[in-house]
Amino acid sequence: MVWGYGPFYVDSDDHDDLYVELQTDGNLIIYDDEDNKEIFNSGTYIPQSYLQLYDSGAVEIRTPLSAIVWTIVTPQEPGNSNHYSSTTTSSSSTAVTYKPGKLVYNPELNLFISEGLEGRLIATSDEFVNLSNKKKSKQKFHLQPDGASCFDHSGHFSTSGKPGYYYVSNSEIQIKNKGGVGRIEFDHKGNVLGYEMLLENQTENNCGNGKTPWETFITCEEVRPLEVKLDDDKYAYKDGGHCYEVDPRKFYPTKRTVFGGEDGDRFESMAFDSRYMFKNDVNTLAAFATVDLNNGRIHRYRADPQIIKQALLNDGRDFSDILTTPNTGQIDYLHILRYVSFGGDDDEEGAGHFEWTTDSSKARESAKEYFPSTEGIDCFDGFLYFVSKKKELLFILDLDKQTFITQSTRSGLFQGQPDQVKRLIPPSQQYEIFFPDINMNNNYHNNNNNNDELIYFLEDGGSSKRDLVMGAGVHARDSKGNYFTIAQGDNTLTDETTGLAFCDEGKRLMFAFQDEGKLYELTRSDGHPFYGHSLDVTYHSPTQDK
């Protein structure tokens, strides 16, 4: 990794030499050095932004708080004039030794891990964390670790003053004010520098999470609201859970977001569509949250563009008002307009159209009929992904066209035949037979159809510990539909894994066994990163109770 400001040179197939300059206002300009002609500018204007370069050739523009506002990567297909290849030396010359799915038992870790991986135990619940300086943390690692994210940092707010990363994790304690959020700090070599609770004595049952575009952590309380019957045969809800924004760098204090209003809800996880957030002529952001109830609404919050612009004018340092300022922005909910299943049953795979509505009752009815009990949620390039546990369906929404398709998760997420995976990456033309006007192909699918990429996911088997032959694990599918077990616990570990996150530029895979509270790190012996994306959705075995 190289940190720095100012110009540097990159090569591309279309130009002999390109001159790249990050201006003081945060806008990146690419010139053809031969005739000094501008051929591209990023359109990002955040003063004091800096460049970050990777061995893979990727280049990022980051705000002073390390939020990524723009990136250039090696092009995935010919003719993509907006993507350029860096001349930074790549580690691809190292022989690949990682063999996903070929498990080797490590008795010290009680894990089966894929050949070519190395593992270590980072922390155990209710025990002090071992630090690299031979000392121990001042606080014990939290109980019931759950949703997690990693955050790279430049060193400005770190213990060592040098670049590194944080692993931030929820504590899903189902006792009032006993949940919270903990943080483990690492340096750039993976040494453990410290552990502390960032949020405590305020929340409970902190379940899933989200990661904002400006690099803060959203923790969601999975607290069931009280249902109160009204005179007109309708119901009101109160005293549910909320979502809180936590800054891993402790630059500004934790705040409760506007999701759930005053009454709250049984929130699971959150995702963001920030494609236009840093564009001066638009400055829009949409945030989405899932709710684990039979009639749990999918929430959408559209932030006030003026608050976003004000944050950008403030040197891009404090975005905390965007999700936390009452009576700003707009909250609405997912409503299915039309759904046709390929098998004739609403529980089968299918496709349809949707809208967003402010009618809460209509949204609850839609959720109960089509997507009860939703879980993890993720957003990639205008596509929103979430899972209904009751229906055992993965929903894939095209946010721009307001169309969607569904994928079965029966027998495990992506564990069906390979054609099921093709319908996801990219979606099958089968959908076009039913909906000729629905085209689910987009730049994400086109640019990420790399056979080396894996989609990683976790497991909640739902059986008791005494019935286990092996514990839960981390699993993955490649673009050809091949299924892999990356790591799996032995019969001393229970059947729910949590906290999946990729740290240190994707070189470290983190995950935990929730009941035992054991947090593990996996790295590749060949030094390569873990390619692919992590979907915040969970695999469920066929034996799990619905």
Image (cartoon, rainbow, N blue to C red):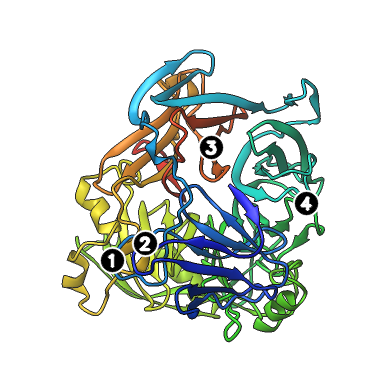
Rounded to the nearest angstrom, the CA distance separating label 2 from label 1 is 7 Å
Residue 103 vs residue 35: left or right? left
Residue situated in front as seen by the camera: 14 or 132: 14
3D distance between C-alphas at marks 3 and 1: 31 Å
Expressed as whole percent of the image width and height from the top left, the position of residue 121 reads: 60, 24
Q: Which residue is mark 3?
A: 508
Q: Point out the tag, 3 or 1, that comes first from the N-terminus.
A: 1
Q: Nearer the viewer, mark 3 or mark 2?
A: 2
The residue located at (55%, 80%) in the rendering is 358
Q: Which amino acid type corresponds to the residue marked 1 in the rendered image? A: Pro
Instruction: Decide which of 65, 413 is in the foreground and name it.
Output: 65
Q: Nearer the viewer, residue 81 or 311?
A: 81
Report the disc number at residue 156: 4
For label 3, the SS is strand
- As drawn, the label of residue 503 is none
Task: Say whether marks 3 and 4 touch (CB < 8 Å).
Answer: no
Disc 2: CA contacts within 10 A as few (<14), some (14-19) or many (>=20):
some
**Comes first in the chain, label 2 or label 4:** 2
> Residue under circle 2?
75
Q: Position of residue 141 (x, y in %)?
A: 72, 31
Q: CA distance from mark 3 to mark 4?
A: 22 Å
Q: Is residue 374 visible?
A: no
C-alpha gap between disc 1 and disc 4: 39 Å
Q: Amino acid at mark 4?
A: His
Q: Residues within 10 Å of mark 3 (few under 14, many from 20)?
A: many
- The amino acid beneath tag 2 is Pro
Answer with left or right where residue 344 lies relative to residue 74: left
Residue lying at 47% horizontally and 19% vertically, measured from the top left: 466
Mark 4 residue element: loop
